[in-house]
Image (cartoon, rainbow, N blue to C red):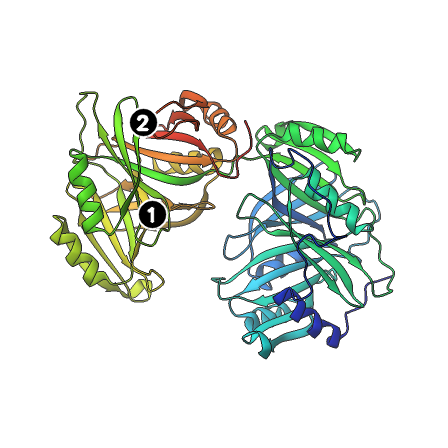
Amino acid sequence: MKNRPINTLALVALSFFLLTGWMSTDHLPGHGNPETPGARTNPAYLRAVGIGVSELESSVAFYTHGLGMKETTRLIRNNRVEVVMQSADARGSDIVLMQYTDNKARAFDQNPGKIVFYAKDVNQFATNIVSAGGQILLPPTAQPQFDGALVGFARDPDNNLIEMVGSNTATESFMSAFGIGVSDLQGARDFYVQVMGLKEQRYIEIPGQYNEYILESVVPGSSALVLMHWTNGIERNYKNNPVKLEFATGVPVDLAIAIKQSRHPLLQFPRPDKRRNKAIVGYAKDADGTLIEIKRSHKNYLSGAGIGVTDLEAAIQFYTHGLGMKQVGRRLRHNREEVVMESADARGSHLVLMGFNDGKPRNYQQNPGKIVFYVNNTTTFVATMVAAGGQILLPPMPQPELGGVEVGFGRDIDNNLIEIVGVPTANHSYFAAFGIGVSDLEAAKTFYTETLGFKLSQFLSTASYDEYILESTGGSALVLMHWTEGSDRNYRDNPVKLELRSLSPLGAAANIKQSRNHVIQLPHISRDQGMEGAMVGYAKDSDGTLLELLKAPWGNED
């Protein structure tokens, strides 16, 4: 039986519950079993979700124009063509549109799940859905009891349920959650928590509609997984729907073994896929036959950026009194002393000041990168920076092409370029991005995106340099810079390092080695003062920039 639209009154009630969790419970008696020991030692996250579609190009057009997504990749699989779609905000999990080529009969219009989008302008989002050929079940409706939050419901051309939520956290829109229908709600919850390593965030009952578990990964940045079981009396098909869940983890073999031990179908043990640049891929199914694709991922992010300084104590004073940072750590490494600085707003990556003590000559004055600070009050920030001994090259001025945002440039006491950007959302200031000079911009972009998993956010070309801005889950952005104004720049072996925290430091090292970049030291337990017990490895990119490989707080046990 084809899914019928939910009635409007029920949807209004549903909106209340979804927004507030009024009926939610966190591990109430009867809702959720204790997690099995070791369930989080190899955490996985929902990298992408797949939905079968009846007509691929029409669906690509709908998800592009109706939901603001963009196509990033096309893949030819053994029984289907896949188009990977990324949200407008480049946040959350991707959506994979799947058109099958094996001529087997599939019901694409009876998916018992849902797709949840957060949108900055949810009314415009609904208008776009209609213009692109979708159907509105309930227009975005203000909920006065909950600060006027707007919630609406729609269906795509294949009848998939779309939930729209107005959100101030969205720049444009992004997929915040993906729901799958399950025949045994408790059993599905136990599998995805105990075997796949997700954590229960909330249990919700929608009287006369459905019950659901909202599950999240301990690894940040992906969309939530919602397990739904309908209670409204309408017959639902929960078995073998054309849906897949792409889970990424540091050690896919271990996850495959856990699935097999749980007596769920393991279709393919993780192995290199020649058609996908030897990416490690495996397949399994849950109890309802939902396809689970297992991939290897290291989920690297920039947790710290290091700069060599001529006088460590003087640099500490400058960054403390001039830029509002504070010292939060001190380390003694084999050839240097490091001081870890945190921004005034405690946001972004740490800045690590490195005082080398091995007697080797280093050029601290010609670093071709930059340090970007977002600040609330550019006038006060500049005055404080100058008073601490810094130099202003260009006072912050409104940039019409950037909507009037104030941007200026200065230098610290070691001649490092500092970019100052006025941002009202900053309480005081924070370290927003770190730029490194690279001799080959395109090759560097390929290495940091394809090998280390950073996401390309933007390309900018200025009168002085070209740059790629790369982002990841957590930390400050990484900027790759190549100067074009004709000056002689040294891109090789600068006293700079990137501290990369990873889901799997050993896996990240293996990827770097496979890319033919230099791995100096495989990750192992450190004895360095200030880093005792931490897993630490080292590598270098093609320009000799030092990469320190560390385990993320949510990383697996390598």
Q: Position of residue 305 (x, y in %)?
A: 33, 39
Describe the element under mark 1 as helix, strand or loop. strand
- Up the image or down, 435 lies above or below 392; here it is above
> Against 287, is 361 above or below?
above
Q: Residue at x 32, y 30 (%)?
A: 545
For residue 544, the mark is 2
Quarter of the figure that contains the N terminus:
bottom right
Residue 551 or 95: which is nearer the viewer? 551
Q: Quadrant of residue 123?
A: bottom right
The residue pinned by badge 1 equals 433
Left or right side of 417 for 555:
right
**Label 1 is placed on what type of residue?**
Ala
* Residue 414 can be seen in this image: no
* Side of 476 where 175 appears, left or right: right
Q: Position of residue 64 (x, y in %)?
A: 58, 59
110 vs 47, left or right, is right
Which x, y percent locates residue 118?
Answer: 57, 62
Q: Nearer the viewer, residue 550 or 415?
A: 550
Q: Is residue 538 visible?
A: yes
Q: Is residue 112 depicted above or below 282 in this figure? A: below
Image location (x, y in percent) of residue 209: 78, 66
- Secondary structure of the residue carrying tag 2 is loop
Q: Earlier in the sequence, mark 2 or mark 1?
A: 1
Residue sitting at 60 percent across and 64 percent down?
66
Instruction: Tell me the amino acid under the disc marked 2.
Output: Gly
Residue at 80%, 43% in the rendered image? 289
The local crowd at label 1, few if under 14, some if 14 to 19, many if 20 or more residues have their Cα within 10 Å, is: many
Q: Nearer the viewer, mark 2 or mark 1?
A: 1
- Residue 451 lies left or right of residue 128; in this view the side is left
